Every structure is written in C-alpha cells, then in structure tokens.
Amino acid sequence: MSGYAVVDVETTGITPASHHRVVEVAVVHVDDSGEVGSEWSTLLNPGRDLGAGHVHRIRAREVRKAPLFEEVAGDLAELLRGRVVVAHNLPFDVRFLAAEYARMGVEVPLSPSQGLCTMGLSRRYLRGTGKRSLEGCCRSAGLRLVDAHSALGDAHAAAGLLRHYLAAAPTPRPWAELLAACAALDWPHVQRSGRATVTRSQAGEGEAHFLERIVERLPGDTATDAADPYLAVLDRALVDRHLSAAEADELVDTARYLGISRETVAAAHHRYLAALADAAWEDGVVTGLERADLQNVAALLGMPPDSVGKELRRAEAERTCGGSAAGGRSAAPPASAFVLDPGDQVVFTGTSRRSRDDWHGMAVEAGLVPKNGVTRQTRILVAADPDSLSGKAKKARERGIPVITEEAFEKLLEAMG
C-alpha cells in the first residue's frame, strides 16, 4: 500500500501535555497522482470538558455518545498504515494522535519526520501569501475552504493543497524516499472494536424528545403520587430553564427506575406547570416575564402550545373562587423557586465567555463562595456547556447538584439583589 493519508484533528486544547484530548479526527486518502479516494471521520468522546467550543463548534451533547479514541484506534491505524501522513501543521496533529495511542500503551510511528506538512510545503509551492494558515494557503492556491475547523472539512482542504503541490512538484517527487519508507513502517496491530463512528451530521440530527423515550405503559404504574420523586429530579433539572441532554437522560432513567409510564410522566408535567401557574398568580398579576417562563417550561416538556393559557386561566379561576375550582382538582406539588443565599458555594467549569477570575469576582461580590472543586457542600455548578463532560460535571450529577448555564447564574445573581 502506498499513497497519502491526509489527517486533521480537533482538540480540547493546544497540547496533550496539559491533558488535552482529540475530540474529532478525519482521514482523506490521496494517491500519488493526486486522486482523492476514501474518507473517514468521527467525533470522539474525550471524557473531559471540550475546551474552546467557539473554535471547533462541537458541543458536549454531540460527543457524549460518540466512541472513545480506543474504540476507533484500530480503524484509524489501518487507515494510516503504509501511507505518508499529511496534515496542515503536521507536528500538531501527529503529536495529539501519538499521545492518544500512548494513553492506550501503544507506540505508533507518527512523527513530523515521517510525514508531509502542507503548511511547510507552502513556502516552496505557493506564491503571494505571507499567511500560512489553512485558509490563507487555500486562498493562494485558488481553493475553497468549506466547513473550516471541522476535521473532515480541514482534511479535505489539506488534501486539496496536497493535490496542488503534487501537480507542481517534479518527477520523481522530492519526497519519493519518504513514500517508500512510510510504506515499510512497522505499524502495531491494534484490535478493531467495530464501534460505529459518529459524524457531525449524525450528531446534529435531533434526538427524540425525552418523553418519547419513556414507554407507554409499565407494570405497576398506578398512582400519580409515584411520580413525586420524578418531579423532584425535574425541578432540579429546570433550575436554569434549560434541559441538557444529560438531564433528559436522567429523567428517562428516573421514570424507568420508578416504573412509571409516559402517561404518568405527562400528567406529572401537567402538575408541574400547574404549580408554576399558581405561583405566578400569587400576587394577583401575571407579568410578561412569568408568562414567558411558563411557555419556556411547557416547550421543554413537550406540552401543547395552549397549555400555558389553560393553566393560567385555571389558576385565576381557583384564586377567584378562594382556591376551589369547579369540579375540583388534586393539589399540584409545590414548585420551588431556586435561589442562592450568601455563603453558598459555587463552582465553575469549561471555557466560558468570561474569564474565571471575572466569574469568581462576581460571585464574591454577591456574597457567594467560589470553589475550585465540587464537594457535597457545592450549591451549584456553572458550566459553559451544560452537557459538559468535565470531572466536575460528572461529580455534580452523581451528587444531585444542579448544573446550570452561565445565563442562569447571572439571573440568580440579579435575584440576590
């Protein structure tokens, strides 16, 4: 086997020495004539926070069910075996890939000296550009960069640059010896797991609403009171009025554990919305913000668009009648108004739009106590991405500590005065 394997990785940070990981990898095969062949890509679950999401545009909810690196390491090794590895900024990509294999205890022949760098070769084969970025090189070569900062998009762009260089290079190739040497490299055998890849397009396909993942009926599903523990989980999940994919999974798992059906869960959602409507009418006025809050909750719970209007009218009628509406109804569970109190401990995770020092300063100013690690005394975890895979987020979920968005934290600070 001979030819080229053009690779690109998206990562959680700039160096594996700081425990950063690969979160997406792509390979595009190119033969020595410049013909593009097969391609392969997958998102990866790095088991940690994703870092600069504004760069790679990957969210934790997309990778939480993606394969681990070790689950695709065998497939990737076969794609690289016998080929010259090519990348734009080759040292960056091969260093991360070699580090991922090293985590498995596997040594692979990946190094800058055993590949081609399209950025380095631009000095020889491109003119009129002082910029060596992938975008700048593509522009100089008359190529279009599509879907920048996705592994497959960048790998295709680098493959286009390689084709440009192959067309301009003399025969025999200046790197002919490298082609022969890479074809003979001793790649270790890495067991192939058969794990399916997960691409950005697949991850972007909307998951079914969590209510649809709860079975219609289950044995032992009797009284609606059985849903009270479910409501407690729901109340915690909706503290920030955002339902992350991890929280949706937790609700599904809770319903299964309790043995309650979709019908009972839907009734519990109705009770929850009713409690919010009652709370909105407590002072005799329903503001636009309160109505918008109810509409947001109803949408998150997959309830019909007219649910909010019906519950507000019902709550108004019961208030007018002294709390006893015609026909009667069972009392709704109380909806907690989550608040922070001075002295509460708060922890932050992820690469956010504010610096960590800024967040800590805001917390201290409000009388809160920012901490670096999650403990049982932690009141909330503020996450740049509420589906964060960080160790802090995992620990918070295990201990039932709310994981909230930055926007929700700002609102809680405002409520503190």
Image: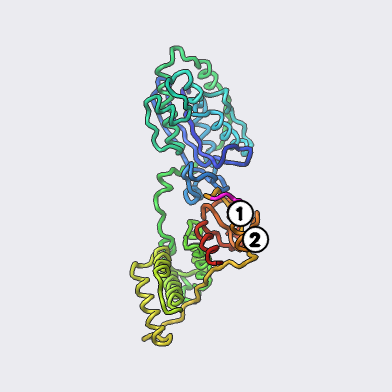
**Whole-percent x, y for residue 66 in the image:** 49, 46
Q: Which mark is residue 56?
A: none
Quickly name the residue at label 1: 392
Magenta-highlighted residues: 354-361
Look at label 1 and name its amino acid: Lys
Q: Taking 32 as reference, is 281 above or below it? A: below
Q: Position of residue 405 (x, y in %)?
A: 51, 57
Q: Secondary structure at mark 2?
A: strand
Q: Quadrant of residue 21?
A: top right
Where's residue 94, x and y in %?
Answer: 56, 31
Q: Which residue is mark 2?
A: 369
**How many dots with numbers?**
2
Which of labels 2 and 1 is toward the front?
Answer: 2
Can residue 353 be seen here? Answer: yes
Magenta stretch containing residue 298, yes or no? Answer: no
Task: Tell me which colouring the rendered structure shows.
Answer: rainbow
SS assignment for the magenta stretch, majority: helix
Whether residue 217 is visible to the viewer of this picture, yes or no, is no
Is 356 within the magenta?
Answer: yes
* Label 1 environment density (alpha carbons within 10 Å; few <14, some 14–19, many ≥20): many
Q: Residues within 10 Å of mark 2 (few under 14, many from 20)?
A: some
Q: Quadrant of the C terminus?
A: bottom right
